[in-house]
Image (cartoon, rainbow, N blue to C red):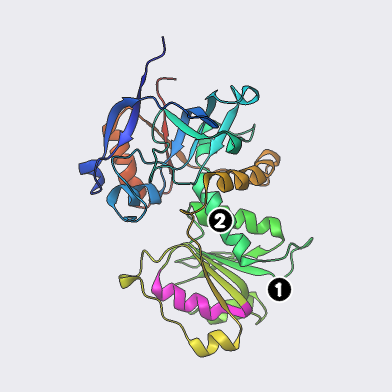
Amino acid sequence: MASPLQNAVRFSQTGPVATVLTIQQTLKPTPPPSYSLIQIRASAINPSDVGNVEGRFPQATTTPRTPGRDFAGVVAEGPAHTLGKRVWGTGGSNGFDRDGSHAEWIVVPSDAVEEMPANLSFAQAAACGVGFLTASGMVDRAAIPHKKKKQPDNQKKPAGSSGAVGTAATQLLSLTGAIPLLTSRRSEPNSINITQDLGPQIVTTTTGKGVVAIIDCVGEASLFKKALEALGENGRYVFITAGRTPGFQFTLDALDFYRHNKSLIGLNTLPISFEDSSATLAKLKQGFETGALMPPQAIEEVDLADQGAVVEAYEKVKAGAKAKLVLVNGNL
């Protein structure tokens, strides 16, 4: 007989990860009508999950709670045609005001269950969620028309392009026909050194036109000022965080900004419903199956039942780990 209990990451109040995060035995959830029960095989840890536990989203987080937004697994209960399907999911209020994916089971709306790419492992599929959801939203807001050939006037500069969102955005930008200009804190081939004056580098790279869009995954005031000046006429600056800026304050040259018809666009993925998030994943699925899109290359798997390892994994994510940390169900 299947156990009515499951291992789940839990926090009863927000605070330091090492203090409030535990692994507990909780009741296996029961899906209400129109919902499906997913047996989770893998679930990724994102910076927003760490922020959730630490209390950085007070208007969104309720406790006690199981955190986690991304997952991949198998449909155990739901519509007959979905049973046994390998699925993936992300987004919605999972992990914030309803229990999330850092557990062995999760309940999600049946009409938003999406099959994962056939060529990905569970860990790879789970590692794609929030990163690609966010990158897709940023690229959409950057509003670059698709082109059949890459042309030098269709430049985009992803700031912070080595992280999960920046790496995903770079891939998605390439599919539009844009030429992503990567950023770095040192001089490297085919990249913009953000520790130096951007002006000469941008002039040389874009033949003086400036970039048409900037995708900022860092949220650093000094970089914001430099990058905004790199935008060309009608340029769009899309950002997702102000976390590295004291007081969360940015300043800009208003005269240059309005005279060149520039736009500043923020993106918050927390209000995106699970259904809309699943629709985004469905659009991306073919890209992964054809090899046009790739999951994170460095994935570190962690046993969900090992509290010490789970806490350490959360701390690694907070510290900016290069590898994607993914919780796996060691009982399967």
Q: Is residue 196 visible?
A: no
Span colored in magenta:
220-234
The amino acid on which the numbered mark 1 sits, given as a three-letter code, is Asp
| Sequence-first disc among 1 and 2 | 2
143 horizontally vs 221: left or right: right
Q: In this figure, which residue is indicated by the disc labeled 2?
A: 135
Q: Looking at this view, is 35 or 182 the one in front?
A: 35
Any magenta on residue 225?
yes
Any magenta on residue 314?
no
Looking at the rendered image, the quarter that the N terminus falls into is top left
Q: In this figure, which residue is indicated by the disc labeled 1?
A: 153
Residue name at image x 23 percent, y 48 percent: 16
Label 2 crowding class (10 Å Cα cut-off): few <14, some 14-19, many 20+?
many
Chief SS of the magenta region:
helix
Provide residue 270's location: percent of width, then percent of height: 46, 53
- In the rendered image, the vertical position of residue 130 relative to residue 73, given as above or below: below
Circle 1: element type = loop
Q: Is residue 257 visible?
A: yes
Provide residue 217's location: percent of width, then percent of height: 47, 62
Label 1 crowding class (10 Å Cα cut-off): few <14, some 14-19, many 20+?
some
Circle 2: element type = helix
- In the rendered image, the vertical position of residue 300 relative to residue 174, given as above or below: above
- In the rendered image, the vertical position of residue 222 relative to residue 103, given as above or below: below
- Cα–Cα gap, marks 1 and 2: 21 Å
Q: Looking at this view, is 210 or 83 the one in front?
A: 83
Residue name at image x 32 percent, y 46 percent: 62
From the viewer's perspective, is the residue at label 1 or at label 2 nearer?
A: 2
Provide residue 26's location: percent of width, then percent of height: 32, 27
The amino acid on which the numbered mark 2 sits, given as a three-letter code, is Ala
